[in-house]
Image (tube, grey):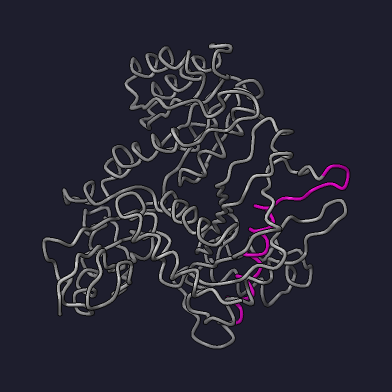
Amino acid sequence: MSRVSLAVCVDLGSTFTKALLVALEDGAAGPAGTVLASASHPTTLPDAAGRGDLLDGYDACRAALAASYPCGSGADDVVVLACSSAGGGLRIGVLGNEALVTAEAGRRVALSSGGRVVAVHALAQDGTDPGALAAARPDVVLLTGGTDGGNPTPLVEGARVLAALARQGWDGAVVVAGNVDAAPAAAAVLEEAGLAHRTAGNVVPRIGVLAPASARARVRELFLAHVIGGRRLSRRPELPRLLRGATPDLVLDGVALLADVVGDVVVVDVGGATTDVYSATEVDPEHASREVVARTRLNRTVEGDLGMRWSAPSTVAAADDPGVAHDPALVAAAQRRADDPALLPATPEDQAVDLRIAEVAVRTAVRRHAGRFVDRDRDRTDGGGTDLREVALLLGSGGVLRHAGTDRSRAVLRAATGDAGAGPGGWLVPAAPRTGLDGSYVLAAVGLLAADHPEVARSLVRSLAAGAAT
Protein backbone atom coordinates (compact mmCIF):
# COMPACT_ATOMS: atom_id res chain seq x y z
CA MET A 1 0.00 0.00 0.00
CA SER A 2 1.39 3.38 -0.91
CA ARG A 3 2.28 5.68 1.92
CA VAL A 4 0.11 8.67 2.77
CA SER A 5 0.45 11.53 5.20
CA LEU A 6 -1.97 11.04 8.07
CA ALA A 7 -3.59 12.98 10.88
CA VAL A 8 -5.00 11.53 14.08
CA CYS A 9 -7.75 13.87 15.29
CA VAL A 10 -8.63 13.22 18.94
CA ASP A 11 -11.44 14.52 21.14
CA LEU A 12 -10.50 13.88 24.78
CA GLY A 13 -14.00 13.94 26.25
CA SER A 14 -15.17 13.75 29.83
CA THR A 15 -16.57 10.25 29.33
CA PHE A 16 -15.24 8.98 26.00
CA THR A 17 -12.17 9.73 23.92
CA LYS A 18 -12.88 9.65 20.18
CA ALA A 19 -10.30 9.52 17.39
CA LEU A 20 -10.30 9.64 13.60
CA LEU A 21 -7.47 8.74 11.26
CA VAL A 22 -7.64 11.11 8.28
CA ALA A 23 -5.65 11.13 5.04
CA LEU A 24 -3.89 14.45 4.45
CA GLU A 25 -2.79 13.57 0.92
CA ASP A 26 -4.24 11.59 -1.97
CA GLY A 27 -3.26 7.94 -1.78
CA ALA A 28 -4.29 4.38 -2.50
CA ALA A 29 -6.84 4.45 0.33
CA GLY A 30 -8.60 7.47 -1.14
CA PRO A 31 -8.29 11.22 -1.65
CA ALA A 32 -7.19 13.72 0.97
CA GLY A 33 -9.89 14.09 3.59
CA THR A 34 -10.83 10.41 3.63
CA VAL A 35 -11.55 9.00 7.09
CA LEU A 36 -9.46 5.83 7.13
CA ALA A 37 -10.43 4.55 10.59
CA SER A 38 -12.20 5.61 13.77
CA ALA A 39 -12.01 4.52 17.40
CA SER A 40 -13.37 5.39 20.83
CA HIS A 41 -12.46 4.42 24.38
CA PRO A 42 -13.60 5.45 27.86
CA THR A 43 -11.68 8.46 29.15
CA THR A 44 -9.66 7.94 32.33
CA LEU A 45 -8.97 10.85 34.67
CA PRO A 46 -6.47 10.73 37.54
CA ASP A 47 -7.96 9.62 40.87
CA ALA A 48 -7.00 10.80 44.35
CA ALA A 49 -4.09 8.36 44.41
CA GLY A 50 -2.76 9.63 41.11
CA ARG A 51 -3.78 6.54 39.15
CA GLY A 52 -5.00 7.00 35.61
CA ASP A 53 -4.17 9.61 33.00
CA LEU A 54 -6.19 11.61 30.48
CA LEU A 55 -4.06 10.17 27.69
CA ASP A 56 -4.82 6.53 28.56
CA GLY A 57 -7.89 6.68 26.30
CA TYR A 58 -5.78 8.27 23.59
CA ASP A 59 -3.31 5.38 23.77
CA ALA A 60 -6.15 2.87 23.40
CA CYS A 61 -7.55 4.76 20.41
CA ARG A 62 -4.13 4.89 18.74
CA ALA A 63 -3.79 1.14 19.16
CA ALA A 64 -7.26 0.57 17.69
CA LEU A 65 -6.52 2.87 14.74
CA ALA A 66 -3.27 1.04 14.07
CA ALA A 67 -5.09 -2.30 14.10
CA SER A 68 -7.67 -0.98 11.62
CA TYR A 69 -5.15 0.74 9.38
CA PRO A 70 -1.60 -0.55 10.01
CA CYS A 71 -0.04 2.22 7.91
CA GLY A 72 -0.97 4.58 10.76
CA SER A 73 0.75 2.61 13.50
CA GLY A 74 2.94 5.41 14.78
CA ALA A 75 5.08 6.55 11.85
CA ASP A 76 6.84 9.88 12.17
CA ASP A 77 4.70 11.55 9.52
CA VAL A 78 1.48 11.06 11.50
CA VAL A 79 0.43 14.38 13.02
CA VAL A 80 -1.74 14.27 16.14
CA LEU A 81 -4.23 17.06 16.84
CA ALA A 82 -6.38 17.00 19.97
CA CYS A 83 -9.12 18.95 21.68
CA SER A 84 -10.60 18.33 25.11
CA SER A 85 -13.65 18.87 27.31
CA ALA A 86 -12.34 16.57 30.05
CA GLY A 87 -12.41 17.45 33.72
CA GLY A 88 -15.74 19.24 33.40
CA GLY A 89 -14.77 21.35 30.41
CA LEU A 90 -13.88 25.03 30.49
CA ARG A 91 -15.70 27.02 33.19
CA ILE A 92 -15.99 30.68 32.22
CA GLY A 93 -17.20 33.60 34.30
CA VAL A 94 -18.15 36.95 32.81
CA LEU A 95 -17.62 40.27 34.58
CA GLY A 96 -19.03 43.29 32.79
CA ASN A 97 -20.54 46.66 33.56
CA GLU A 98 -24.08 46.81 32.14
CA ALA A 99 -26.14 43.62 32.18
CA LEU A 100 -27.66 44.29 28.76
CA VAL A 101 -24.48 45.45 27.05
CA THR A 102 -20.98 44.36 28.04
CA ALA A 103 -22.03 41.51 30.35
CA GLU A 104 -24.38 40.08 27.69
CA ALA A 105 -21.70 40.51 25.04
CA GLY A 106 -19.22 38.71 27.27
CA ARG A 107 -21.66 35.85 27.81
CA ARG A 108 -22.08 35.32 24.07
CA VAL A 109 -18.34 35.47 23.44
CA ALA A 110 -17.65 33.06 26.31
CA LEU A 111 -20.07 30.52 24.88
CA SER A 112 -18.52 30.82 21.42
CA SER A 113 -15.10 30.24 23.02
CA GLY A 114 -16.03 26.72 24.03
CA GLY A 115 -16.80 27.29 27.68
CA ARG A 116 -19.66 26.67 30.04
CA VAL A 117 -20.70 30.04 31.44
CA VAL A 118 -20.98 29.49 35.20
CA ALA A 119 -21.57 33.10 36.29
CA VAL A 120 -22.35 36.50 34.78
CA HIS A 121 -21.80 39.54 37.03
CA ALA A 122 -22.72 43.10 36.00
CA LEU A 123 -21.15 45.80 38.16
CA ALA A 124 -23.86 48.39 37.50
CA GLN A 125 -26.61 46.03 38.65
CA ASP A 126 -24.86 43.56 40.97
CA GLY A 127 -22.28 45.80 42.69
CA THR A 128 -18.67 45.05 43.51
CA ASP A 129 -19.15 42.11 45.88
CA PRO A 130 -17.40 39.20 44.11
CA GLY A 131 -18.95 36.48 46.28
CA ALA A 132 -21.26 34.95 43.68
CA LEU A 133 -18.52 34.97 41.07
CA ALA A 134 -16.10 33.29 43.47
CA ALA A 135 -18.66 30.63 44.39
CA ALA A 136 -18.97 29.65 40.70
CA ARG A 137 -15.24 28.71 40.58
CA PRO A 138 -14.54 29.85 37.01
CA ASP A 139 -11.33 28.71 35.31
CA VAL A 140 -11.28 31.88 33.22
CA VAL A 141 -13.06 35.21 33.66
CA LEU A 142 -13.82 37.32 30.62
CA LEU A 143 -13.53 40.93 31.82
CA THR A 144 -15.49 43.41 29.72
CA GLY A 145 -16.64 46.99 30.15
CA GLY A 146 -16.97 50.19 28.18
CA THR A 147 -16.78 51.00 24.49
CA ASP A 148 -13.47 52.12 23.01
CA GLY A 149 -12.72 55.71 23.97
CA GLY A 150 -15.47 55.75 26.61
CA ASN A 151 -15.42 55.76 30.40
CA PRO A 152 -12.35 53.79 31.58
CA THR A 153 -13.60 53.29 35.13
CA PRO A 154 -15.75 50.11 34.72
CA LEU A 155 -12.95 47.98 33.25
CA VAL A 156 -10.44 49.01 35.92
CA GLU A 157 -13.04 48.53 38.66
CA GLY A 158 -13.73 45.06 37.32
CA ALA A 159 -10.01 44.26 37.51
CA ARG A 160 -10.02 45.36 41.15
CA VAL A 161 -12.92 43.01 41.85
CA LEU A 162 -10.92 40.14 40.38
CA ALA A 163 -7.87 41.17 42.38
CA ALA A 164 -10.04 40.88 45.50
CA LEU A 165 -10.98 37.36 44.40
CA ALA A 166 -7.29 36.50 44.11
CA ARG A 167 -6.70 37.67 47.68
CA GLN A 168 -9.46 35.27 48.73
CA GLY A 169 -7.69 32.37 47.04
CA TRP A 170 -9.06 32.32 43.47
CA ASP A 171 -6.24 31.42 41.09
CA GLY A 172 -7.99 31.44 37.72
CA ALA A 173 -7.05 33.43 34.65
CA VAL A 174 -8.48 36.56 33.04
CA VAL A 175 -9.06 37.77 29.50
CA VAL A 176 -9.30 41.58 29.42
CA ALA A 177 -11.66 42.41 26.55
CA GLY A 178 -13.11 45.85 27.24
CA ASN A 179 -12.33 49.49 26.49
CA VAL A 180 -8.89 49.32 24.83
CA ASP A 181 -7.88 52.66 26.36
CA ALA A 182 -8.44 51.26 29.87
CA ALA A 183 -7.00 47.80 29.18
CA PRO A 184 -3.38 48.61 30.21
CA ALA A 185 -4.50 49.95 33.59
CA ALA A 186 -6.76 46.93 34.15
CA ALA A 187 -3.94 44.57 33.20
CA ALA A 188 -1.63 46.32 35.67
CA VAL A 189 -4.11 45.65 38.48
CA LEU A 190 -4.27 41.96 37.53
CA GLU A 191 -0.48 41.76 37.26
CA GLU A 192 -0.06 43.17 40.76
CA ALA A 193 -2.56 40.61 42.06
CA GLY A 194 -0.56 37.77 40.47
CA LEU A 195 -3.38 36.67 38.14
CA ALA A 196 -2.58 35.06 34.80
CA HIS A 197 -4.13 37.20 32.09
CA ARG A 198 -4.24 38.07 28.40
CA THR A 199 -5.40 41.29 26.75
CA ALA A 200 -7.77 41.09 23.77
CA GLY A 201 -9.63 43.53 21.58
CA ASN A 202 -12.85 44.99 22.94
CA VAL A 203 -15.82 42.66 22.45
CA VAL A 204 -18.06 45.77 22.18
CA PRO A 205 -15.87 48.39 20.50
CA ARG A 206 -18.97 50.48 19.90
CA ILE A 207 -22.68 50.11 20.55
CA GLY A 208 -24.31 47.74 18.08
CA VAL A 209 -21.09 45.83 17.32
CA LEU A 210 -19.96 42.49 18.74
CA ALA A 211 -16.35 41.49 17.96
CA PRO A 212 -15.62 38.07 19.46
CA ALA A 213 -12.59 36.83 17.47
CA SER A 214 -9.76 38.34 19.52
CA ALA A 215 -11.27 37.33 22.87
CA ARG A 216 -11.95 33.80 21.60
CA ALA A 217 -8.30 33.45 20.65
CA ARG A 218 -7.09 34.65 24.07
CA VAL A 219 -9.50 32.30 25.88
CA ARG A 220 -8.12 29.43 23.80
CA GLU A 221 -4.57 30.38 24.82
CA LEU A 222 -5.46 30.41 28.51
CA PHE A 223 -7.31 27.11 28.20
CA LEU A 224 -4.17 25.48 26.86
CA ALA A 225 -1.66 27.21 29.13
CA HIS A 226 -3.56 27.53 32.39
CA VAL A 227 -6.60 25.30 32.62
CA ILE A 228 -5.50 21.90 31.32
CA GLY A 229 -2.07 22.08 32.95
CA GLY A 230 -3.48 23.44 36.18
CA ARG A 231 -5.83 20.48 36.56
CA ARG A 232 -2.99 17.96 36.20
CA LEU A 233 -5.14 15.75 34.01
CA SER A 234 -2.03 14.13 32.60
CA ARG A 235 1.50 13.60 33.86
CA ARG A 236 2.77 13.17 30.32
CA PRO A 237 4.60 16.11 28.73
CA GLU A 238 3.08 15.67 25.27
CA LEU A 239 -0.43 16.79 26.27
CA PRO A 240 0.18 20.55 25.81
CA ARG A 241 1.79 19.83 22.44
CA LEU A 242 -1.18 17.79 21.23
CA LEU A 243 -3.98 20.10 22.38
CA ARG A 244 -5.36 22.81 20.13
CA GLY A 245 -8.26 24.02 22.28
CA ALA A 246 -11.52 23.22 24.03
CA THR A 247 -13.71 20.79 22.09
CA PRO A 248 -16.75 23.10 21.70
CA ASP A 249 -14.47 25.89 20.47
CA LEU A 250 -13.07 23.65 17.71
CA VAL A 251 -16.53 22.23 16.89
CA LEU A 252 -17.79 25.77 16.30
CA ASP A 253 -14.93 26.27 13.83
CA GLY A 254 -16.11 23.09 12.11
CA VAL A 255 -19.69 24.36 12.02
CA ALA A 256 -18.49 27.58 10.37
CA LEU A 257 -16.77 25.61 7.63
CA LEU A 258 -19.82 23.39 7.18
CA ALA A 259 -21.96 26.49 6.68
CA ASP A 260 -19.61 27.67 3.93
CA VAL A 261 -20.53 24.50 2.05
CA VAL A 262 -24.25 23.98 2.80
CA GLY A 263 -25.55 27.39 3.89
CA ASP A 264 -27.14 28.12 7.27
CA VAL A 265 -26.68 25.19 9.62
CA VAL A 266 -27.57 24.08 13.16
CA VAL A 267 -25.83 21.31 15.09
CA VAL A 268 -27.34 19.79 18.25
CA ASP A 269 -25.02 17.74 20.46
CA VAL A 270 -26.95 15.77 23.10
CA GLY A 271 -24.74 14.71 25.99
CA GLY A 272 -25.22 13.08 29.35
CA ALA A 273 -25.31 16.34 31.32
CA THR A 274 -25.83 19.11 28.76
CA THR A 275 -27.15 19.75 25.28
CA ASP A 276 -25.12 22.12 23.11
CA VAL A 277 -26.55 23.93 20.10
CA TYR A 278 -24.27 25.51 17.50
CA SER A 279 -25.45 27.65 14.61
CA ALA A 280 -23.92 29.45 11.65
CA THR A 281 -26.45 31.78 10.03
CA GLU A 282 -26.49 34.90 7.94
CA VAL A 283 -27.22 37.94 10.09
CA ASP A 284 -30.22 40.08 9.15
CA PRO A 285 -28.73 43.62 8.83
CA GLU A 286 -32.11 45.26 9.49
CA HIS A 287 -32.59 43.38 12.73
CA ALA A 288 -28.94 43.81 13.78
CA SER A 289 -29.24 47.58 13.42
CA ARG A 290 -31.86 47.61 16.19
CA GLU A 291 -29.76 45.67 18.71
CA VAL A 292 -27.47 47.13 21.37
CA VAL A 293 -25.29 44.01 21.13
CA ALA A 294 -25.36 42.83 17.52
CA ARG A 295 -25.94 39.27 16.37
CA THR A 296 -22.97 37.31 15.07
CA ARG A 297 -22.84 34.64 12.36
CA LEU A 298 -21.58 31.97 14.78
CA ASN A 299 -23.46 31.23 17.98
CA ARG A 300 -23.47 28.54 20.64
CA THR A 301 -25.68 27.86 23.63
CA VAL A 302 -25.29 25.28 26.38
CA GLU A 303 -28.34 23.97 28.22
CA GLY A 304 -27.13 22.62 31.56
CA ASP A 305 -30.54 21.20 32.50
CA LEU A 306 -30.96 19.12 29.33
CA GLY A 307 -29.16 15.80 29.01
CA MET A 308 -29.53 12.06 28.82
CA ARG A 309 -28.20 10.98 32.24
CA TRP A 310 -27.23 13.45 34.95
CA SER A 311 -29.84 15.94 33.67
CA ALA A 312 -32.52 13.46 32.57
CA PRO A 313 -35.06 14.44 35.30
CA SER A 314 -34.87 18.16 34.49
CA THR A 315 -35.06 17.34 30.77
CA VAL A 316 -38.36 15.52 31.21
CA ALA A 317 -39.64 18.33 33.44
CA ALA A 318 -38.84 20.84 30.67
CA ALA A 319 -41.14 19.15 28.13
CA ASP A 320 -43.78 21.47 26.69
CA ASP A 321 -46.28 18.59 26.66
CA PRO A 322 -47.70 18.01 30.18
CA GLY A 323 -48.38 14.42 29.20
CA VAL A 324 -44.64 13.94 28.83
CA ALA A 325 -43.46 16.12 31.70
CA HIS A 326 -45.79 14.39 34.18
CA ASP A 327 -45.72 10.86 32.83
CA PRO A 328 -44.96 8.82 36.00
CA ALA A 329 -43.17 6.05 34.13
CA LEU A 330 -40.98 8.48 32.19
CA VAL A 331 -40.21 10.55 35.29
CA ALA A 332 -39.13 7.39 37.13
CA ALA A 333 -37.03 6.21 34.19
CA ALA A 334 -35.31 9.60 34.00
CA GLN A 335 -34.47 9.45 37.69
CA ARG A 336 -32.95 5.98 37.23
CA ARG A 337 -30.66 7.44 34.59
CA ALA A 338 -29.57 10.26 36.87
CA ASP A 339 -28.89 7.78 39.68
CA ASP A 340 -26.89 5.53 37.34
CA PRO A 341 -25.24 7.68 34.62
CA ALA A 342 -23.40 4.61 33.27
CA LEU A 343 -26.71 2.91 32.41
CA LEU A 344 -26.83 1.55 28.87
CA PRO A 345 -30.18 0.74 27.21
CA ALA A 346 -30.39 -3.05 27.24
CA THR A 347 -33.95 -3.50 25.96
CA PRO A 348 -36.13 -1.94 23.25
CA GLU A 349 -38.12 -0.30 26.05
CA ASP A 350 -34.96 1.35 27.45
CA GLN A 351 -34.02 2.53 23.97
CA ALA A 352 -37.49 4.02 23.47
CA VAL A 353 -37.19 5.92 26.76
CA ASP A 354 -33.81 7.31 25.75
CA LEU A 355 -35.26 8.54 22.46
CA ARG A 356 -38.19 10.22 24.22
CA ILE A 357 -35.77 12.05 26.52
CA ALA A 358 -33.56 12.96 23.56
CA GLU A 359 -36.54 14.37 21.67
CA VAL A 360 -37.36 16.68 24.58
CA ALA A 361 -33.71 17.74 24.91
CA VAL A 362 -33.35 18.52 21.19
CA ARG A 363 -36.67 20.31 20.84
CA THR A 364 -36.18 22.42 23.98
CA ALA A 365 -32.54 23.27 23.29
CA VAL A 366 -33.20 24.38 19.71
CA ARG A 367 -36.14 26.53 20.82
CA ARG A 368 -34.04 28.22 23.48
CA HIS A 369 -31.27 28.86 20.98
CA ALA A 370 -33.71 30.26 18.42
CA GLY A 371 -35.86 32.38 20.69
CA ARG A 372 -39.16 33.97 19.67
CA PHE A 373 -40.43 37.04 17.94
CA VAL A 374 -43.37 39.31 18.67
CA ASP A 375 -45.82 40.21 15.93
CA ARG A 376 -45.15 43.95 16.15
CA ASP A 377 -41.60 44.00 14.75
CA ARG A 378 -40.35 40.44 15.16
CA ASP A 379 -37.86 41.42 17.82
CA ARG A 380 -36.98 38.53 20.09
CA THR A 381 -38.87 38.68 23.34
CA ASP A 382 -36.10 36.92 25.26
CA GLY A 383 -33.33 39.16 23.95
CA GLY A 384 -31.05 36.32 22.91
CA GLY A 385 -32.35 34.19 20.07
CA THR A 386 -30.95 33.36 16.65
CA ASP A 387 -33.39 33.21 13.75
CA LEU A 388 -33.10 29.64 12.44
CA ARG A 389 -36.10 29.52 10.09
CA GLU A 390 -34.01 29.46 6.90
CA VAL A 391 -31.53 26.85 8.11
CA ALA A 392 -30.62 24.40 5.35
CA LEU A 393 -29.23 21.57 7.50
CA LEU A 394 -29.98 20.37 11.03
CA LEU A 395 -27.28 17.99 12.19
CA GLY A 396 -27.37 15.80 15.27
CA SER A 397 -24.50 14.54 17.40
CA GLY A 398 -24.03 12.62 20.62
CA GLY A 399 -24.16 9.00 21.69
CA VAL A 400 -27.94 8.66 21.93
CA LEU A 401 -28.39 9.74 18.29
CA ARG A 402 -25.33 7.90 17.08
CA HIS A 403 -26.66 4.59 18.41
CA ALA A 404 -30.29 5.19 17.43
CA GLY A 405 -29.84 4.57 13.73
CA THR A 406 -30.50 6.92 10.84
CA ASP A 407 -34.31 6.89 10.76
CA ARG A 408 -34.84 7.24 14.51
CA SER A 409 -32.20 9.95 14.93
CA ARG A 410 -33.80 11.97 12.13
CA ALA A 411 -37.20 11.58 13.77
CA VAL A 412 -35.75 13.04 16.98
CA LEU A 413 -34.29 15.98 15.07
CA ARG A 414 -37.53 16.68 13.22
CA ALA A 415 -39.23 17.26 16.58
CA ALA A 416 -37.32 20.56 16.70
CA THR A 417 -38.49 21.84 13.30
CA GLY A 418 -41.44 23.31 11.50
CA ASP A 419 -43.38 25.09 14.25
CA ALA A 420 -42.29 28.70 13.71
CA GLY A 421 -45.38 30.86 13.99
CA ALA A 422 -46.34 34.17 12.47
CA GLY A 423 -47.95 35.56 15.61
CA PRO A 424 -46.66 36.65 19.00
CA GLY A 425 -44.50 34.06 20.70
CA GLY A 426 -43.68 32.06 17.59
CA TRP A 427 -40.47 30.04 17.77
CA LEU A 428 -37.78 30.90 15.20
CA VAL A 429 -36.82 27.24 14.66
CA PRO A 430 -35.78 25.59 11.37
CA ALA A 431 -38.79 25.36 9.07
CA ALA A 432 -37.87 22.54 6.68
CA PRO A 433 -34.17 21.61 6.92
CA ARG A 434 -32.40 18.53 5.72
CA THR A 435 -31.46 16.38 8.68
CA GLY A 436 -28.34 14.32 9.24
CA LEU A 437 -26.01 12.86 11.81
CA ASP A 438 -22.38 13.48 12.68
CA GLY A 439 -22.03 9.89 13.76
CA SER A 440 -18.21 9.84 13.81
CA TYR A 441 -17.70 13.25 15.47
CA VAL A 442 -16.25 14.64 12.26
CA LEU A 443 -16.89 18.29 13.16
CA ALA A 444 -14.27 18.25 15.91
CA ALA A 445 -11.76 16.88 13.40
CA VAL A 446 -12.76 19.58 10.90
CA GLY A 447 -12.08 22.26 13.50
CA LEU A 448 -8.74 20.71 14.37
CA LEU A 449 -7.65 20.58 10.72
CA ALA A 450 -9.10 23.88 9.49
CA ALA A 451 -6.12 26.13 10.27
CA ASP A 452 -3.23 24.05 8.88
CA HIS A 453 -5.05 21.76 6.43
CA PRO A 454 -8.02 23.79 5.14
CA GLU A 455 -8.61 21.73 1.97
CA VAL A 456 -8.64 18.50 3.95
CA ALA A 457 -11.11 20.05 6.39
CA ARG A 458 -13.32 21.13 3.48
CA SER A 459 -13.23 17.64 2.03
CA LEU A 460 -14.41 16.22 5.36
CA VAL A 461 -17.20 18.77 5.50
CA ARG A 462 -18.35 17.97 1.97
CA SER A 463 -18.51 14.28 2.82
CA LEU A 464 -20.47 15.05 5.98
CA ALA A 465 -22.91 17.25 4.06
CA ALA A 466 -23.36 14.62 1.33
CA GLY A 467 -24.39 12.08 3.96
CA ALA A 468 -27.28 14.27 5.11
CA ALA A 469 -30.22 13.12 3.00
CA THR A 470 -33.41 15.10 2.53
Residue 303 vs residue 38: left or right? right
User: Front-most of 28 and 342?
Assistant: 28
Q: Position of residue 153 (x, y in %)?
A: 54, 11
Front position in the image: 192 or 134 = 192
* Residue drawn at point x = 56 percent, y = 47 percent: 299
The percent position of residue 394, horizontal first and vertical second, equals: 59, 65
Screen quadrant of the C terminus: bottom right
Where residue 144 sits: x, y (%)?
52, 25
357 part of magenta stretch: yes
- 259 in magenta: no
Residue 416, quarter of the rendered image: bottom right
- Indicate left or right for 304 with 53 as reference: right
Q: How many numbered marks are there?
A: 0
Is 461 situated above or below 354?
Answer: above
Range of magenta residues: 352-377
Judge by depth and name the residue closer to the eye, 367 or 26: 26
Residue at coordinates 45% horizontally, 33% vertically from top-left? 215
Q: What residue occupies the far bottom of the structure in this picture?
A: 348
Q: Main secondary structure of the magenta part?
A: helix
Q: Give me the residue at 55% from left, 61% from top.
A: 267
131 up-or-down from 223: above or below: above
What is the quadrant of the N terminus in the image? bottom left
Q: x%, y% of residue 447?
A: 39, 54
Most distant residue in the left direction: 76
In the displayed structure image, the side of residue 434 where residue 178 appears, left or right = left
Q: Is residue 281 above or below residue 415?
A: above
